[in-house]
């Protein structure tokens, strides 16, 4: 296609797009349009819903297929989610050699994570001892930047504690939480980001956070801070100390 | 969450559990929707092994990237079917399956009318879908069938039917809009 598609042409193609029936160059133009057009996204959702009944049989998938899918889940999850350590109590039992392999892999992961955590803590110490002023200055700048995403965290239980945070357009976040009471050395504050229906860990703040930096990639709509065991947790069961 | 409870939770809540590595939630999503994805892939590919591969891809992707499903953009069912359709069409359009496709097209273009497969279990829904399809104009129905169930692009559909491309894309769009209304009137697919 030599000329770019106009909006009217793109809208006319939404139906064909829903059926995977457009050419690759048209697909790219339609997807770019969809990203900024809620009305066309709604139309697409309707088309997809309608089309989803066209092949309706009501018949189940083959029984043996679930077994294969379930077995494929045993492979290590993507690297990003390795940071989320979660006991897997409902796994079907792998063979004994597989268990040892898993245990060895888990040990390696734990060592790597410990090293990463030590490094992280060392970095945080550095920041606090050597660059605290610079970080505080960057944080102040970010806090006054209207293009940033600003958050105020307050106590759900009504305690007189609060914190503020900002996420810059580039995804660097700053948290000012000097109000928080100091925790015992075997505890840490942990920062969480709420993104859609997911709650993801944004990092450990230590037992006595002042100014912290964090990285938030994409779509964080809310923040929360919990009190956890030192080392942090994958999925929190605590009521937040502070939340937006 | 126990087996009994999980049967009652919404698809959106199921996906939150999947994002937390709860395999029982993926199993429940599979129980609810894998049959539909498999039926579609098998119809498109006319090959059981390839259809199973598509279903496996779709559910592994849901496990590995649950955040790609946005409940505000439609139902889990239509999301999974769209994923399965896209994957099937990719396979269909790949070089290796071109020959099989040409053979199958020779059969398909000879067929006419809307025909559900024989293994229909839920006759209420199947009847509703059949009834909704019958409300469409012939040109709309055939264009949608050839595109969605035949895996053809609208340009190919235009060539197959001997009609202008512009007419075919308009008919696909108007036919889908009409189909959606008819299905809702028949009590099918009212969400979201």
Image: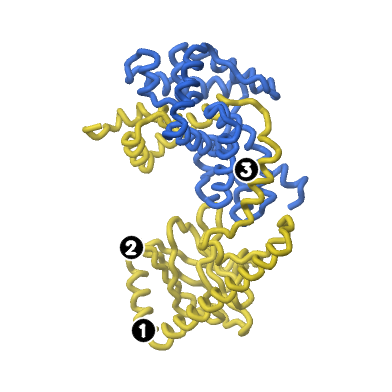
Chain colours: A yellow, B blue
- CA separation, marks 1 and 2? 22 Å
Please tell me whether residue B162 is drawn above or below residue A151 in the rendered image. Answer: above
Q: Which residue is mark 2?
A: A146
| Mark whose residue sits in front, 1 or 2 | 1
> Residue shown at 45%/55% (left/top)?
A219
Q: Which residue is mark 3?
A: B11
Q: Read off the chain for label 3.
A: B
| Mark whose residue sits in front, 1 or 3 | 3
Mark 3 crowd level (few <14, some 14–19, many ≥20, 10 Å Cα): some
- Tag 2 and tag 3 share a subunit: no
Mark 1 crowd level (few <14, some 14–19, many ≥20, 10 Å Cα): few
Please tell me whether residue B64 is drawn above or below residue A56 in the rendered image. Answer: below
Q: How many marks?
A: 3
Asked if the residue at tag 2 contacts the one at tag 1, i.e. Cβ–Cβ closer than 8 Å, the answer is no
Asked if the residue at tag 3 contacts the one at tag 1, i.e. Cβ–Cβ closer than 8 Å, the answer is no
- CA separation, marks 2 and 3? 38 Å
**Label whose residue precedes the other's in the sequence (1 or 2):** 1
Helix, strand or loop under label 2: loop
- A2 vs B111, left or right, is left
- A238 vs B157, left or right, is right
Q: Read off the chain for label 2.
A: A
Mark 2 crowd level (few <14, some 14–19, many ≥20, 10 Å Cα): few
Please tell me whether residue B95 is drawn above or below residue A212 in the rendered image. Answer: above
Based on the displayed image, in which of its 4 quarters is residue B122 positioned?
Answer: top right
Q: Which residue is mark 1?
A: A133
């Amino acid at each position: 296609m030599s000329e770019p598609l106009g909006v009217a042409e793109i809208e006319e193609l939404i139906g064909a797009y829903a059926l995977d029936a457009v050419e690759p160059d048209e697909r790219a133009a339609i997807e770019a349009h969809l990203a900024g057009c809620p009305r066309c996204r709604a139309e697409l959702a309707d088309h997809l819903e309608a089309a989803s009944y066209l092949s309706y049989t009501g018949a189940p998938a083959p029984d043996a297929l679930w077994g294969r899918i379930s077995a494929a889940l045993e492979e290590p999850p993507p690297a990003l989610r390795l940071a989320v350590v979660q006991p897997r109590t409902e796994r079907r039992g792998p063979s004994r050699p597989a268990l040892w392999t898993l245990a060895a892999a888990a040990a390696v992961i734990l060592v790597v994570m410990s090293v990463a955590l030590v490094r992280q803590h060392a970095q945080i110490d550095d920041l606090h001892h050597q660059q605290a002023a610079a970080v505080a200055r960057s944080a102040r700048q970010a806090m006054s930047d209207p293009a940033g995403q600003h958050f105020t965290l307050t106590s759900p239980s009504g305690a007189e504690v609060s914190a503020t945070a900002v996420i810059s357009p580039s995804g660097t976040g700053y948290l000012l939480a000097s109000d928080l009471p100091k925790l015992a050395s075997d505890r840490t504050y942990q920062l969480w980001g709420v993104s859609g229906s997911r709650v993801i860990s944004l990092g450990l703040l230590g037992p006595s956070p002042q100014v912290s930096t964090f990285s938030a990639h994409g779509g964080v709509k809310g923040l929360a801070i919990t009190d956890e065991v030192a080392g942090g947790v994958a999925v929190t069961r605590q009521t937040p100390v502070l939340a937006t | 969450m126990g087996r009994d409870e999980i049967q009652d939770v919404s698809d959106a809540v199921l996906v939150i559990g999947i994002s937390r590595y709860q395999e029982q939630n993926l199993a429940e999503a599979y129980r609810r929707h894998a049959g539909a994805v498999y039926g579609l892939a098998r119809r498109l590919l006319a090959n059981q092994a390839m259809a199973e591969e598509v279903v496996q891809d779709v559910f592994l992707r849901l496990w590995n990237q649950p955040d790609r499903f946005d409940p505000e953009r439609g139902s889990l069912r239509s999301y999974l079917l769209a994923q399965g359709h896209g994957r099937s069409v990719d396979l269909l359009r790949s070089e290796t399956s071109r020959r099989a496709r040409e053979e199958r097209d020779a059969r398909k273009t000879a067929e006419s009318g809307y025909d559900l497969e024989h293994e229909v279990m839920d006759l209420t829904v199947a009847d509703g879908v059949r009834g909704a399809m019958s409300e469409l104009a012939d040109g709309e129905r055939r264009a949608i069938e050839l595109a969605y169930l035949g895996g053809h692009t609208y340009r190919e559909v235009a060539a197959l039917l001997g009609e202008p491309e512009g007419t075919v894309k308009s008919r696909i769009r108007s036919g889908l809009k009409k189909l959606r209304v008819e299905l809702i009137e028949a009590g099918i697919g009212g969400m979201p």
